[in-house]
């Protein structure tokens, strides 16, 4: 048996879809993993239940009004977890000397500061929160490089690419003989919906993903294909590949999680059932392999794998993401911020589905390019883009 090193883990966004899958894998391997801190924005009940199961040293609840009650309930149950609140507390539990690894699974730009704190503190960082990387690309990767943090992609596609690259890969596709990164996309719930019907689709339809059960924001991103756009930018930063070497392949079965095409003609892929516990377990145990509770892949049941080109006419968000990556500077941060605002407005039924892309395109066109060489500059670009996006959203309000 190889030696097992025990890891103390902070799970940011513990009550979300990725957070729950992470705790499921952790619970299967108590000798390997223990929980140092759990965090959630709301849902104090769920957080309480998780604290009682995993006895973390800290719990961070974003909603300050619920902190006293959560602390009291923990005390009543004889649990010694200390409850904190605020973004500084998130940074504290991400960078604490007693933490070995951090799962960054907060949704959206709100996750940037704690993820960056973990990167700066040299932690093993398991990154699900792709928005953090889209927002702050170079800054984030520089922080990882400077501190010696180890970065594991949790996004299934990027985890698949990580698994398909050589072990000593140093963010240089040319040096590794990589011709292209092939990012697979399910195509989402509207892959075959005619353009004319897209304006009528509801948040419920958008959140009903054919292959994955996920949080609401990423579900809408999958429906617009902005998720794949964010992932192109994420792949650029993680693997050092220029936009021209990252190709999106629609693959409706979501069995191939992505591929790497090498100059000798080899294409290496990672396959599996669509279950986020696979990439989570891979990152948690790397370089070892552990049981993740995932069903064995039955190729006879799947029988066939299909591939299509993405349709940039019906899914303009993917085009906008490539455009923002090409423009560089603050453009990806603007794209991300406008998208978060537009998705919120769509989920609230303030705007229609096709308005999401319109809001992002207008915001990108009107945003002043800014350098994003510090956290303050990134946050300023994010804030400015949100203000602009809200104006664009109001113009399109549904009666
Ligand atoms: P989710 O909505 O299910 O969970 C989000 C978590 O973040 C919750 O615990 C919530 O309490 C917390 N949170 C929300 N807003 C917050 C804020 N302002 N401050 C602090 N915490 C906050 O989302 P999810 O589907 O688990 O996705 C999490 C991240 O992982 C996203 O960035 C998403 O893109 C990425 N991701 C998810 C999947 C998936 O299968 N769900 C796959 C790949 C990548
Ligand atoms: Mg993904």
Image (cartoon, grey):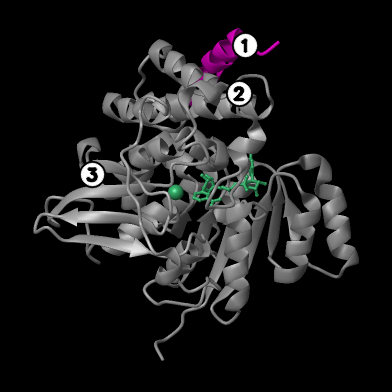
Q: Which residue is mark 1?
A: 394
Q: Nearer the viewer, mark 2 or mark 3?
A: 2
Number of the front mark, 1 or 2: 2
Q: Main secondary structure of the magenta part?
A: helix
Q: Which residue is mark 3?
A: 241
Give the Cα separation between the discs numbered 1 and 3. Answer: 37 Å
Q: Compared with residue 158, is residue 281 higher up or lower down, i.e. above or below? A: below
Mark 2 = which residue? 200
Q: Could you say whether the residue bearing mark 1 is in a helix, strand or loop?
A: helix
x, y percent for residue 219: 56, 41
In the rendered picture of this protein, how many numbered marks are placed on residues?
3
- Other-residue count near label 2 (Cα within 10 Å), few / some / many at <14 / 14–19 / ≥20: few
Q: Earlier in the sequence, mark 2 or mark 3?
A: 2
Give me the C-alpha separation between circle 2 and circle 3: 37 Å
Magenta-colored span: 382-399
- Residue positioned 67% across, 19% down in the render: 350
- Could you tell whether 304 is left or right of 218 in the image? left
Tell us which disc is closer to us: 1 or 3: 1
């Amino acid at each position: 048996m190889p030696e097992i090193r025990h890891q103390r883990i902070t799970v940011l966004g513990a009550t979300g879809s990725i957070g729950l899958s992470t705790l499921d894998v952790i619970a299967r391997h108590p000798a390997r993993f223990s929980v140092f801190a759990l965090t959630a924005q709301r849902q104090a009940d769920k957080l309480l239940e998780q604290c009682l199961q995993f006895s973390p040293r800290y719990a961070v609840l974003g909603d300050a009004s619920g902190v006293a009650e959560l602390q009291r309930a923990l005390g009543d149950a004889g649990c010694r977890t200390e409850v904190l609140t605020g973004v500084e507390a998130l940074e504290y539990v991400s960078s604490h000397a007693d933490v070995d690894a951090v799962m960054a699974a907060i949704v959206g730009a709100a996750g940037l500061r704690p993820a960056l704190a973990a990167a700066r503190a040299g932690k093993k960082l398991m990154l699900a929160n792709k928005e953090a990387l889209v927002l702050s690309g170079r800054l984030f990767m520089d922080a990882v490089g400077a501190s010696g943090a180890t970065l594991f992609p949790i996004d299934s596609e990027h985890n698949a690419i990580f698994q398909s690259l050589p072990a000593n890969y140093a963010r240089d596709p040319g040096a590794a003989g990589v011709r292209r990164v092939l990012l697979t996309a399910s195509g989402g719930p509207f892959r075959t919906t005619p353009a004319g019907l897209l304006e009528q689709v509801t948040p419920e339809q958008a959140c009903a993903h054919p292959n994955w059960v996920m949080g609401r924001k990423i579900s809408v991103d999958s429906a617009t294909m902005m998720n794949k756009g964010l992932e192109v930018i994420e792949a650029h930063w993680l693997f050092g590949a220029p936009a021209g070497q990252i190709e999106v392949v629609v693959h409706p079965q979501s069995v191939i999680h992505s591929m790497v095409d090498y100059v000798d003609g080899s294409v290496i892929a990672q396959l599996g059932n669509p279950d986020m516990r696979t990439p989570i377990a891979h990152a948690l145990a790397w370089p070892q392999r552990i049981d993740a509770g995932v069903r064995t892949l039955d190729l006879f049941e799947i029988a066939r794998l299909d591939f299509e080109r993405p349709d940039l006419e019906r899914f303009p968000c993917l085009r906008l993401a490539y455009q923002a990556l090409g423009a560089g500077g603050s453009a990806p941060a603007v794209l991300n911020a406008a998208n978060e605002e537009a998705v919120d407005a769509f989920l609230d039924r303030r705007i229609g589905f096709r308005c999401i892309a319109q809001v992002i395109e207008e915001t990108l066109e009107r945003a002043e390019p800014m350098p994003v060489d510090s956290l303050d500059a990134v946050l300023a670009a994010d804030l400015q883009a949100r203000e602009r996006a809200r104006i664009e959203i109001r113009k399109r309000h549904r009666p």
